[in-house]
Amino acid sequence: MRTAGRLGIGTSDVLLTAALLVVILFAVLVLPRHWIDGEPIDALGLALLVLSALPVLVRRRYPVVALLSCVLVEIVYHALGYAHEAGLPVAVVLIYTVSVGTSRVATLVVLGVTSLALLLTVGLKQDGPPGVEVISPLGWFVVAAVGGQAVRIHRAFLAESTERRVAEERLRIARDLHDVLAHHIVVINSHAGVAAHLLDERGDDPTLAPITRSLHTVADASSGVLAELRTTLDVLRGNETDADRQPAPGLDGLAGLASVTGEVGVAVDVDVRGTRRPLASAVEVTLYRITQEALTNVVRHARAQRARVVLEYGTDQVRLEVTDDGHGADGTGGGYGIVGMTERAHAVGGRLDTGNGPAGGFRVAVTVPTGMPTGAPTGAPAGGAR
């Protein structure tokens, strides 16, 4: 099975090869002798026909190599004078495969080489001009090449149309985010900043200190959201560059999430267990965003006083658990928070478990393998409700 995986052999390839062999063997063994010209088929001829069909197994991974291998075997087959029609189906299938997967120029080159091999092998054995045993295969070769190019062009057109629709949709989303979400965040940031500044000027009243801290938290959080939103808009518009890209959040930011959550009234303890080590960027972003969403849900829904974040490094996996001392799930949540967290975990090969904790409150636990290759997708954006 490992060899089949490396060679790209699929079930469809095996079935197609078997079907071609059935057609070939039926033609040379069952059809009346006078229907097919050439020397009577013998063990050597059968072996050559089977060898010429075997490259079909690897046609998708190595189309040109498969065709050339078939041509080399069929040169020997035709040179020995066996029935020329029997080897035609395999060559037609392989020419079509090459044409679908390569450019017009490459198809013309391969078609020319195959046709030349046929002319030299079959045509030179004849006393007169090329007959139907040469003209007919050449016609089928041209049909296979033209058909493959037509399919390739059609697929390219469909892919281009899909990409264009995706680009248009991304631009529409970017415009909506900019015109609606960004505008409201700017308003929140401005008003929170002004209010905090006015209260700072009245520092003689200690009862205003908690309000001032909350306003500063709102202003700082909205500024961070604006920065991430600008990065998202650049990505959606295709304007993102390495210089403009904001640093990806990671597990180093868990303390910051705990601090922000504590400023809005929920104390958060962060407990890191095991030997801490660098993880793939996709894994770090996923765990950060799941923690962010889980703590957001604690603040919004749990009516909790405390929460706990446990990050445990294992040998080949990392486990993150967020619990709180709130009232737990009441079954009325209709948001997309858990859906988004689940999608993020699955995107990096992990598993998410949620539900009421054994001692009350709500529990979010995610386990992610640390063998995640760098650069894998990071799932859906954070946001939503429990």
Image (spheres, rainbow, N blue to C red):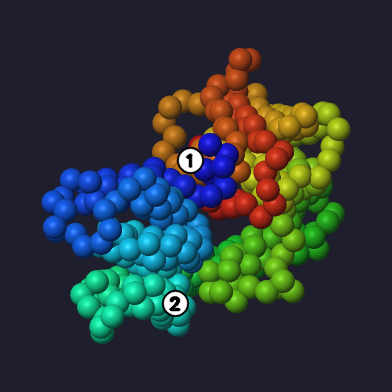
Residue drawn at 28 percent across, 58 percent down: 39
Residue 222 appears left or right of 56:
right
- Asked whether residue 79 is in view, the answer is yes
Mark 1: give few (<14), some (14-19) or many (20+) Cα within 10 Å.
some
| Contact flag, marks 1 and 2 (Cβ < 8 Å) | no
Nearer to us in this view, 301 or 172: 172
On the image, the x and y values in percent for residue 326 come to: 60, 25
- Asked whether residue 99 is in view, the answer is no
Secondary structure category for the residue under label 1: helix
Residue 162 appears left or right of 320:
left
Secondary structure category for the residue under label 2: helix
Check the image and name the residue furthest to the front. Answer: 127
On the image, the x and y values in percent for residue 30 come to: 18, 45
Label 1 sits on what residue type?
Val
Question: Which mark is in front, 1 or 2?
Answer: 2
On the image, the x and y values in percent for residue 109 come to: 45, 80
**Up-down relation of residue 302 to residue 88 (above or below):** above
Q: Which residue is mark 1?
A: 339
Label 2 sits on what residue type?
Val
Residue drawn at 40 percent across, 53 percent down: 48
Nearer to us in this view, 42 or 136: 42
In the picture, residue 158 is in which quadrant? bottom left
Residue 133 appears left or right of 245:
left
**Up-down relation of residue 38 to residue 167 (above or below):** above
Residue drawn at 53 percent across, 50 percent down: 7
Sequence-wise first label, 1 or 2:
2
